[in-house]
Amino acid sequence: MKLEKIMDSVSSFFEKHVRPVHRITSVSEKDEYWEVGLEVIEEKEYMKRYGRDQLIGEYIAKLDDDLDVTSFERMALRQRTSVKREDEEGR
């Protein structure tokens, strides 16, 4: 149940402050916080208007023990159709 609450908290935060979450890719517990990896579709309407592929932002969010998002960072930006190589994962 806690994982669902973590995922809901991150989704709600991103919906309100950044962009809707496309997919949560990881949830892991660290020493003093939770870390969540997620993907967000960036500039959807702009890209659609110009007939370009959508851009996916790959983010890391950190949550405290109360499951509040304390920080987030976009780690990468890629085209939706690009394939992520194995050696790029786990940065």
Image: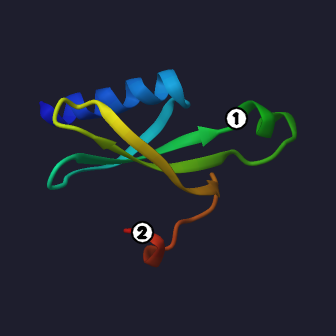
Mark sitting earlier along the chain (1/2): 1
In the rendered image, residue 44, in percent from the top left (x then y), is placed at 70, 35
Residue sticking out furthest to the bottom: 87
* Along the viewing direction, whichever of 67 and 49 lies nearer the viewer: 67
- Label total for image: 2
* Along the viewing direction, whichever of 43 and 81 lies nearer the viewer: 43
Q: Classify mark 1: helix, strand or loop.
A: helix
In the rendered image, residue 77, in percent from the top left (x then y), is placed at 61, 55
| Residue marked by disc 1 | 44
Q: Which mark is drawn over residue 1?
A: none
Res 41 → quadrant: top right
* Left or right, 17 with reference to 1: right
Q: Is residue 84 above or below residue 78?
A: below
> What's the residue at 63%, 57% (across, down)?
78
| Cβ atoms at labels 1 and 2 below 8 Å apart | no
Res 69 → quadrant: top left
Residue count near mark 2 (Cα–Cα under 10 Å), binned few <14, some 14–19, many ≥20 = few
Q: Classify mark 2: helix, strand or loop.
A: loop
Q: Is residue 77 above or below residue 7?
A: below
Quadrant for the N terminus, please: top left
Render colour scheme: rainbow
Residue count near mark 1 (Cα–Cα under 10 Å), binned few <14, some 14–19, many ≥20 = some
> What's the residue at 55%, 30% (across, down)?
19
Amino acid type for the residue under numbered disc 2: Glu
* Along the viewing direction, whichever of 75 and 71 lies nearer the viewer: 71
Quadrant for the C terminus, please: bottom left
* Left or right, 40 with reference to 38: right
| Residue marked by disc 2 | 89
User: For the residues marked 1 and 2, what is the alpha-carbon distance in whole angstroms?
Assistant: 24 Å
In the rendered image, residue 64, in percent from the top left (x then y), is placed at 22, 38
In the rendered image, residue 38, in percent from the top left (x then y), is placed at 42, 45
